[in-house]
Image: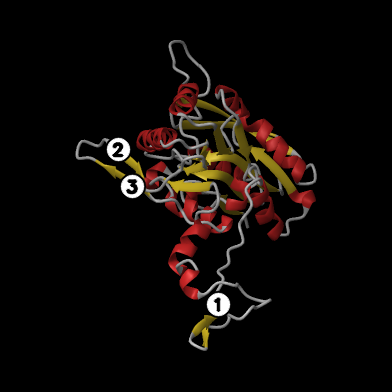
Amino acid sequence: MASSSLLWLCSSNALISPATLLKAHPRFPIRQRFRCSLVEPLKFENGKPHFPLLTSGPAFPTFLSPNSHFQNDINKHDTRLRIFSGTANPALAQEIACYMGLELGKIKIKRFADGEIYVQLQESVRGCDVFLVQPTCPPANENLMELLIMIDACRRASAKNITAVIPYFGYARADRKTQGRESIAAKLVANLITEAGANRVLACDLHSGQSMGYFDIPVDHVYGQPVILDYLASKTICSDDLVVVSPDVGGVARARAFAKKLSDAPLAIVDKRRHGHNVAEVMNLIGDVKGKVAVMVDDMIDTAGTIAKGAALLHQEGAREVYACSTHAVFRYVMLGGSLSVFKSF
């Protein structure tokens, strides 16, 4: 009996491994913290204070030692690395900070009555390497503007380096002109981030690799592919039964790279015709999936029209099982109060 499964890594809901996002920055050591305490109390001999010489402890009395609370503050801030979170995904930022053995930086973000955004850093970042975790997921405009203001605040506070950690890069689909008199919004957003003061961008599974070229600053592009491969490996699927499917022609390169990781599995392509924005119509399948386990690979699921219709076509063509794997689960309809009932259709 045919069955289907769905897997996604949601960068806007903190399902991306922090180890994947921080792999590109191994140069910051995690400091070992300690606190010295007096082994023996101060003693008096003949009315004069006497402190025994110890080889296994500090040689200072308690009243000359730093206050324990102050000592903790020193240890906590003795690194030049700062991690701040926007409002788009604080859970992800917290998980990254815990992985690094740090605390999230203190930042104040609020919105005025007219919708304008206010950002103030609550601690010094002078000379620090600052990482701002703020995916530009829906609502993309608000989250993007918040990121720009955060970058500007860090720049004006004399941060040494500012890295914008953007797991989900909004406007990435507007990466080229398909008709006359269209804008290339991905390039515009790249310019805004650069001009705001960012020195580096860290992104995950961009819609197209060419988006990296839109930035005039270094871009670290990491992938969620290893996590998906681990999930499929846990299913103990025979490699001879696997077929990797690209849900559209534009994702062929991504699907081919994925297939190579799965013992060079065969490839199939769903040919579709798009009649409007966020509307997809499946036409036919290029490749053989009869009796196979089909694994559809895409970078994001927005309205789920492409995935749902693609899965229906794969079942019609005789696929035994269908897995839909995506890095970014946008699910805009769900955010607007809808449901995931679209996946029940296949």
Q: Earlier in the sequence, mark 3 or mark 1?
A: 1
Relative to 205, 104 lies left or right: left
Sequence order check: which comes first, mark 3 or mark 2?
3
Instruction: Return the residue nearer the eye: 256 or 127.
Output: 127
Q: Residue at x 79, y 49 (%)?
A: 240
Outermost residue to the front: 46
Look at mark 3 in the image and give the residue it sits on: 108
Are there few (<14), some (14-19), or many (20+) residues within 10 Å of tag 1?
Answer: some
Q: Position of residue 310 (x, y in %)?
A: 57, 39
How far, Cα to Cα, is label 1 from label 2?
49 Å
In this figure, which residue is indicated by the disc labeled 1?
38
Few, some or many residues within 10 Å of mark 3 (<14, 14–19, 20+): few
| Mark count | 3
Secondary structure at badge 1 equals loop
Specify the amino acid type for callout 3.
Lys
Say which element carries label 3. Answer: strand
Is residue 289 something one can see in this rendering? no
Q: Secondary structure at mark 2?
A: strand
Nearest the viewer among 105 and 9 is: 105
